[in-house]
Amino acid sequence: MSSLLKVIESITNWLNDDVFPDIKLKQYADNELGYVKVSPVAFSMFMPNREMRENSEEIPCPCALVQFNDATDYLKTHTGTVNILLHLMIWNPGTHDSETTAENVISPDMKYSRDADGWKDAVIFADCISQKLKAAGNINGHRILYENGIKTYPYKEENAIIDFYPRYFVEMEFSVENASATSPKPYQKYL
């Protein structure tokens, strides 16, 4: 397996195994509340198409795509840097009474208030990941390059924040060291 592929898969697995089980966000459901709270799911590089998903009706949401912007191998030091891009997506059409009342209280007169505050859940989602990144030090052997920072911003197209209500998107960038980057043996004598 290529070292770049290992990095992408390691980060995806880390999110699914160590980060996302602690996070609960809204997912559409055809029930009395109109939603359920679920843990997000991470995918590597691309969102699976309908045929590949277990539930072919809906895009899994909340979710994250783990992609790389670019990667650099430093042949002389046998290290490399991978610049990671996380696309985060959440669903939140508004405030439900169940969010402001005692747990597990469901009644026919509960109300739902449509609003555009779902972006706050997207930012909280990013903050949770950022806190885990800051505490981790490394992800499955790949050192997080804190000196490069962790960048978080809303998804944009042509420099404008796009409204995909009731879905909200945030992107994050950070870098990891790829210590398993190797240089081809025939070139070693020239380095």
Image (cartoon, rainbow, N blue to C red):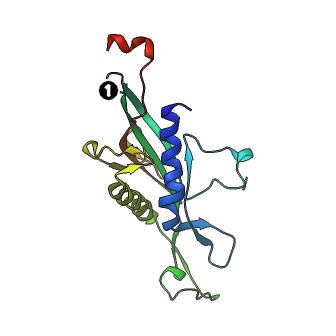
> Left or right: 190 with respect to 8?
left
> Left or right: 172 with respect to 115?
left
Q: How many marks?
A: 1
Residue at image coords 35%, 46%: 144
Q: Quadrant of the N terminus?
A: top right
| Location of residue 62 in the rendering, given as x and y in whole percent from the top left corner | 55, 59
Of all residues shown, which one is farthest toward the left?
147
> Left or right: 66 with respect to 129?
right
Q: Quadrant of residue 74?
A: top left
Residue 23 seen in the current view: no
Residue at image coords 50%, 45%: 10
| Location of residue 143 in the rendering, given as x and y in whole percent from the top left corner | 36, 44
| Location of residue 152 in the rendering, given as x and y in whole percent from the top left corner | 35, 50
Residue at image coords 49%, 54%: 15
Q: Eyeballing the image, is 180 above or below 89?
A: above
Q: Eyeballing the image, is 85 above or below 128?
A: above
Residue 182 seen in the current view: yes
Q: Kindly identify the amino acid type of the residue bearing the numbered disc 1.
A: Thr
Q: Quadrant of the C terminus?
A: top left
Q: Quadrant of residue 147?
A: top left
Q: Nearer the viewer, residue 145 or 79?
A: 79
Q: Which residue is mark 1?
A: 77
